[in-house]
Amino acid sequence: MNLKDKFSNVNQYFSPKIIDEVNDQYIKVAKIKGQEIPWHNHENEDELFYIVEGELLMEIENEPSFTMKKGELFVVKKGVNHWVSSVDECLIMLIESKTTEHTGKVKSPITKSIEEQSY
């Protein structure tokens, strides 16, 4: 599988697509541009972010914000409030437990169900 090729079927920002799975984890790709993701957390699951292209602003509650760049990864630990945004298009890969809800318990116009995340 060529990871970058998988982004060709991602047509909307903030709409992750499941490209494979490993044990009880989904591997997803998403395009980020703008600030539509709400502050949220995942009560029982960690979430891995890997930057494939571009830059992603990562904000963690009560921590200094930081910019992730191509080739960098970060794990948001379970229960930690976080928010991500990007001025320009950013391509990310996520690794999440199959039980992870897209925007945690926070529902917003961009929230996607697992069915909507099918590739």
Image: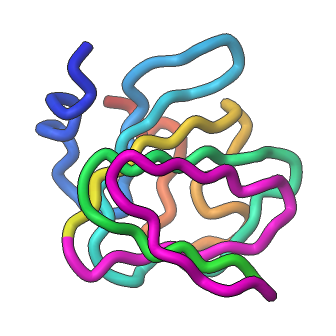
- Specify whether residue 109 is in view: no
Residue 14 against residue 63 in the figure, above or below: above
Q: Residue at x 50, y 63 (%)?
A: 111
- Specify whether residue 9 is in view: yes
Q: Position of residue 19 (x, y in %)?
A: 37, 25
- The verdict on residue 72 being magenta is yes
As drawn, is 2 to the left or to the right of 107? left
Numbered range of the magenta stretch: 62-88
* Screen quadrant of the N terminus: top left
Q: Nearer the viewer, residue 35 or 101?
A: 35
Residue 24, quarter of picture = top right
Q: Residue at x 27, y 73 (%)?
A: 33
As drawn, is 52 to the left or to the right of 111? left
Q: Residue at x 42, y 42 (%)?
A: 93
As drawn, is 31 to the left or to the right of 22? left
* Screen quadrant of the C terminus: top left
What colouring does the structure picture have?
A: rainbow
Q: Nearer the viewer, residue 61 or 55?
A: 55
Q: Residue at x 28, y 52 (%)?
A: 91
Residue 53 against residue 89 in the figure, above or below: above
Q: Position of residue 64 (x, y in %)?
A: 67, 86
Q: Position of residue 69 (x, y in %)?
A: 37, 61
